[in-house]
Image (cartoon, rainbow, N blue to C red):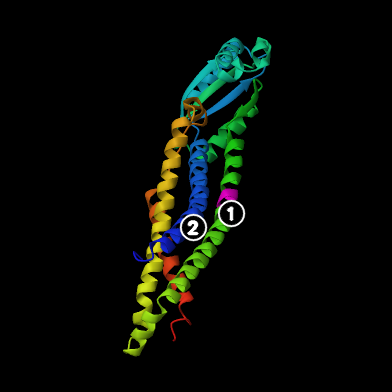
Amino acid sequence: MMREWRLHALSIFSLAVAFVCLGASLLVVANLRALERRWAHAGRASVYLKDGASQDDVEALRAALLRVPGVTGARYVSSSDARVEFGETELAARSELAALPVEAFPASLEINVAQDMPDADLADMVGKMKRLPAVDDVETYQSWTDRLARLVRGGVAASALLAVVVFTAVLAVVGSTMRLALQRRRAEVEVLKLVGATDGFVKKPFVLEGSIQGALGATGAVGLLALLFVVIRGRLDAQLAALVGIEPVFLPWYAALAMVALGAMLGAIAALASLRKLVAV
């Protein structure tokens, strides 16, 4: 490999490009899955009250909610308070929504829910609250969780399709490199065969080279992804991270290690398959 370093460097670069595509898709899926887990247990719900709800009805509802197991807090937000809180957001500052009147913002009870509260208990509580005369609607943000779940499933399917493309690229690149390397060393191989070397003895260095190429290509891809991740995370607006509720996450260590192991395995398989017939000289 040192003697023909240009050939192997080009092969490793091609493999790194292929693995960057696969790693980037896995990185997107990992962040979507983290966001899904975060919003699946958002820890809050909003009970929107009707315009005619009296203060006694609100206090009675708030007291009843605080007695429900799993509810850790219930804060009343009047229409004027909701208008003030919205006016302090960056979204309102950048749009014409800041001119909306107070009546456009419904009063609500902001409920804090324990993270370990079962979904069935939360759904039962929501169903009961919707039947109350003072309640207009209840928002648990489950619709966002469902949308994220669909995005995650789509991302996993896209990653699987991209993995097939990457596998094909690795087999093609490593196989072509090994066949070219064999042609350059044909004289050495013929000498080895004449002195009694077996096919397995001749193939081992090529298979090892293919495995090293695959592992180095995947390692380079992981390193490049880590560099891009640091740059992008540094430019990410902190308010956006606070809005979605999570910080960007990199690939888990076992996923990065699996990519390197996969590259080594595919490289060895490609080298072995490409040399199956060409070694018999």
Q: Amino acid at mark 1?
A: Ala
Above or below, comparing residue 153 to residue 215 in the picture: above
Residue extending furthest left?
195
Residue in view at x 52 percent, y 38 percent: 40
Q: Is residue 4 left or right of residue 105?
A: left
* Image quadrant occupied by the C terminus: bottom left
- Badge 1: residue crowd in 10 Å (few <14, some 14–19, many ≥20): few
Residue in view at x 39 percent, y 60 percent: 215
For mark 1, what is the residue?
157
Mark yes or no: residue 108 visible.
Answer: yes
Q: Mark 2 or mark 1: which is in front?
A: 2
Q: Amino acid at mark 2?
A: Ser
Residue in view at x 47 percent, y 75 percent: 273
Above or below, comparing residue 111 to residue 119 in the picture: above
Q: Secondary structure at mark 1?
A: helix
What's the magenta bit mostly, secondary-structure-wise?
Answer: helix
